[in-house]
Amino acid sequence: MKVFKFGGASVKDADSVRNVAAVLGSQGFDKCLLVVSAMGKTTNALESVVEKYFKKEDYQSEIEEIKKNHIAVAKGLFKEEHTVFGEISLFFDDIDSFLRRNKSPNYSFVYDQVVSCGELISSKILSEYLNEEGYTNQWLDARDYIKTDNTYREGSVNWQLTEANMETIDRSKSYVTQGFIGSDENNFTVTLGREGSDYSAAIFAYCLGADAMTIWKDVPGVMTGDPRKFKNVELLSNISYEEAIEMAYYGASVIHPKTLQPLKQKHIPFFVKSFVEPEKKGTKVGISENNQHIESYILKDNQILMNIATRDFSFIAEEHLSLIFSLLAKYKIKISLMQNSAISLALCLEDKYHHIDELNEELSRTFNTEVVKNVSLFTVRNANMDDLTRFYENRKVLLEQTSRQTLQMVTA
Ligand code: ASP
Ligand code: MG
């Protein structure tokens, strides 16, 4: 089997959905499992529904708005009497009645039950449309297959159960299913974290033992830098799993960090290709001999620089580090880069859940701390070390680190 993943941008309106069919036309849709994200910016809109619900603001009109957008897309694809319109309405009624009845104060739980509907609806529309166009497929509810723990908003996959569930999938057929979602042991919906659809595709690819997985994007493949941020970037046609994982770690948003591990484990080739020009080769990520060592640039914005120093002039030693790391884990703050000296530790941090002030407050009971918000982490992979001065021009560097192949700087 092969696994395809189409993201939100590739199904954002009726023309885009038609383009998905065109891509399948050129690539073939035989023994294919297609994973799709929510349409366009639906996930953000559903997040805002949940936010309003908890703030006791008018969330209903927001639901109506999202529903209107989906109906408009469907109108561009189906005849008026098509059953899909009823199905779309049902999904929105479900959100509404869930929220009316809900008693749970658990934000993340409620979030998952609501926000997951974006993928359910988009996959329904796409599945129905493809069937009409002759791309025969069965709609699968990913929650019947991907099982997780109950860490809502960041479900951790139970691989054993998930693999066993996928045994029942007939590998000679084609399917359309959702990215981003799974379910816990009580069958409540659990999401896998924002941008998690690539990861879903990798989970399916792994469990099905797929021959290949392709992610269809609005860029030609993995580039040596984000074309929106850097000039003169080029396409990387071949990179290793290891290089891809490093790039994802440093913040290359074209690759979702969790996606690579399952693919690497089974040596499943992974392609990143353009849904605008599907005939082009794109990037192949695979086993390491094929890695290209080309200078690449990654810019990660929205970082925090934190300096932690001992008060009594003692060394930053193991006990200090273990306290600091345990607090980082407690607040789910991730380290993007770190550097220590005798009495201080500098950390470049990513604070997805906005806990930095609480962390700082706890740490400042023991240490002298300094926090600089809103800095960037600039990484150069495979840097040409003979000519580094060009990277310092027009940059205010607060912290830097170089290893054999990588130059990193935290800039204001
Ligand atoms: N729809 C989800 C999001 O926007 C998952 C994804 O697109 O990968 O985060
Ligand atoms: Mg997306």
Image (cartoon, helix red, strand yellow):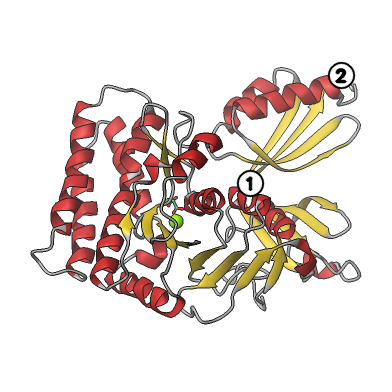
Which three-letter amino acid code belongs to the residue tagged 1?
Answer: Gln
Residue 61 visible within the image = no
Which is in the foreground here, disc 1 or disc 2?
A: 1
Q: Does residue 29 appear left or right of residue 330 in this picture? A: left
Q: Quadrant of residue 238?
A: bottom right
The residue nearer to you, when weighing 202 against 165, is 165
Query: How far from the left and from the top, in percent, is residue 399?
Result: 79, 48
Looking at the rendering, the quadrant in which ligand 2 lies is bottom left
Place of residue 57 in the rendered image (x, y in percent of width and height, measured from the top left): 24, 35
Q: Which residue is mark 2?
A: 312
- Image location of residue 339, percent across then percent down: 82, 41
- Residue 267 visible in the snapshot: yes
Say if 342 sits above or below 253 in the image: above
Question: Where 176 sits versus 289, above or below?
Answer: above
Image-quadrant location for residue 240: bottom right
Of the two numbered discs 1 and 2 on the same chain, state the one appearing first in sequence.
Answer: 1
Q: Secondary structure at mark 2?
A: loop
Residue at the spot 12% in from the left edge and 69% down from the top edge: 79
Residue at 69 percent of width and 54 percent of height? 245
Q: Nearer the viewer, residue 199 or 44?
A: 199
- Outermost residue, left side: 81
Question: Mark 2: which amino acid?
Answer: Asp
Badge 2 density bin: few <14, some 14–19, many ≥20, Cα 10 Å: few
Secondary element under disc 1, as helix, strand or loop, is strand
In percent of the image, x 23 and y 39: which residue is there? 95
Q: Which residue is mark 1?
A: 303
